Image (tube, coloured by chain):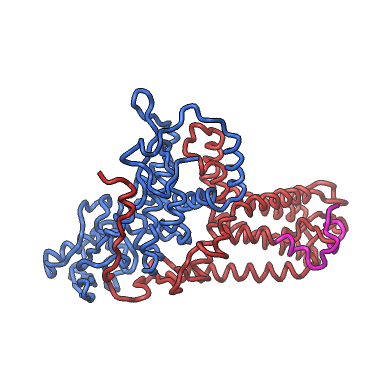
Amino acid sequence: MATTEQLTAVPVVIGGTCGGPPVRTRRRDRWWRAPAATVAFLSAFVAYATWAALENRDYFVGAAAHRDLISPFYSPCVAASCVAGARGGLYLSWWAISPAILVLAVPLGFRFTCYYYRKAYYRSFWRSPPACAVADGHRRYRGETRFPLVLQNLHRYFFLAGLVFNVILTIDAVMAFRLPGDGGIGVSLGTLVLCANAGLLWLYSLSCHACRHLCGGGVDQFSQHRVRHRLWRLVTPLNARHMQFAWASLAFVALADLYVRLVASGVFSDPKLF
Amino acid sequence: MTAEVTMRVWRGEPAGGAFVDYAVPAVDGEVVLDVVHRLQAGPAPDLACRWNCKAGKCGSCSAEVNGTPCLLCMTRMDELPRAEPVVVAPMRTFPIIRDLVTDVSFNYEMARRLPPFAPRPPEANGAYRMASIDVARGQEYRRCIECFLCQDVCHVLRDHEEHKADYGGPRLFLRAMELESHPLDTADRRALVRDQLGLGLCNITKCCTEVCPEHITITDNAIIPLKERVVDAAYDPVAWLGRRIRRRTRRPDPSPLPAADDRSPDKPASGVAGRQ
């Protein structure tokens, strides 16, 4: 009987003429709709986030308006230029440009290396491939084997760093229950917006494939690791909805910024619900 | 008057071929394979088509209908647009033998590269015992019927001939994950799937999952977990440091596993280590 070593030495013979006409695709459905929608949505988000990050104003609604609302793009506000009330005790006195640049680096890295977003932008922006059974848009292909795309393998570190931001944004959501000068503690529409934003970010993070692996993906014998099995069982159903959480949390973080921005700039006041 | 449907079927051999149109009466409840059989019984008795169970379980009748990889026996005619001809072509990724039949031996040759199951020694009574929660995850992997639609649709194999020699494809990664996560297996194939089977070439665009007739979540439940295990072994500096520290502090194992040679004939291949 042949050993495995002998088997691995067998050369793989590949070749021959493929069947069918040499066309880019034979699909006749509207396969281009999904990548086009992804390009439109992600481009809109990047454009808005860039503008909002560079704007460097109208990101905090403070005690003067009887609220404690901060945009998720600017939290934690750790630059000396942060408006009064938005900044904590610890800040970088030498940081001169918008504090949002500091804040957005980690969440953007987390989303850029996310397994779902990789699928989305490889298909839509890089056309590799644009859709299933549609020819790759590039003649040469190296996948994620070379720099810089080999760095996608560091996704788990962005996941862990992202958890810190989730904690901070959850604290922001709790602080949004403060209505100074308007009853002390209550619920406004802004409170609900920040709570929903924090909740969606937690769902997106906990449904992450790296999270699932760290919980128990690397375990072969769950019977020997009951706690990790329980954690793995908890996050696995979330992982199945990772795409939905990815889009919902991305849209809501922009909506939360827009809401705080509109209230801070005086377009409308944040209505108190109870 | 009976409605007709036009079947546009690829007829050809390695030397070349062309689509040929056949007009046949439309029959309610048919799948594409039924119509192919009617063509064989009528106007095209020499039409070559591989099939066996006609129940979506043997994985033989893989082809592309209207450009989408699918099983002919599981594709209903009434779900296809009637206004246009139904285009039936062989799988694009594999060399054609004749008409709708392709040479899928690439997949079997590639599968031989993957070291087989290497179980730990049995218990004293010769039995292997596994807890039910340990085997539950692997059930999904074993649903694979080897239709190779995932291999056909994978753009690395489909569009990049230069990688066919060093890329296993979704089917092989599924098999690798099945073995890697097996509660009894002792071999470590992570270096092999990274260095010799091209796991890094997969950019997880999930087409394999979309076409799988067994609805195996290939990307999320096999390829990505396998990638994360490779990250543990090759890219994660903290995991590397942890392994170094554990190796220094580990006590001698009182009952070490037998050496790889003792597990002959299925000893791990070169480049395949035992679990650390």
Residue A93 drawn in magenta: yes
* A194 on left or right of A219: right
Q: Is residue A86 above or below residue A40?
A: above
* Nearer-the-camera pick, B7 or A156: A156
Percent coordinates x, y for residue B192 in the rendering: 43, 52
Q: How many marks?
A: 0
The image quadrant of residue B65 is bottom left
Q: Colour of chain A?
A: red
* Nearer-the-camera pick, A48 or B199: B199
* A184 on left or right of B186: right
Residue A159 drawn in magenta: no
Which residues are drawn in magenta?
A81-104
Percent coordinates x, y for residue A74 in the rendering: 76, 60
User: The N terminus of chain B lies in which quarter of the figure?
Assistant: bottom left
Percent coordinates x, y for residue B221 in the rendering: 45, 49
Asked if residue A130 shows in the view, the reply is no
* A115 on left or right of A184: left
* A102 on left or right of B85: right
Q: Determine the residue positioned at 82% across, 61% down.
A: A79
Q: Colour of chain B?
A: blue
Percent coordinates x, y for residue A109 in the rendering: 63, 60
Q: Determine the residue positioned at 32% across, 76% down.
A: A22
Q: Determine the residue positioned at 76% across, 51% down.
A: A172
Asked if residue A84 shows in the view, the reply is yes
* Nearer-the-camera pick, A84 or A179: A84
The image quadrant of residue B80 is bottom left
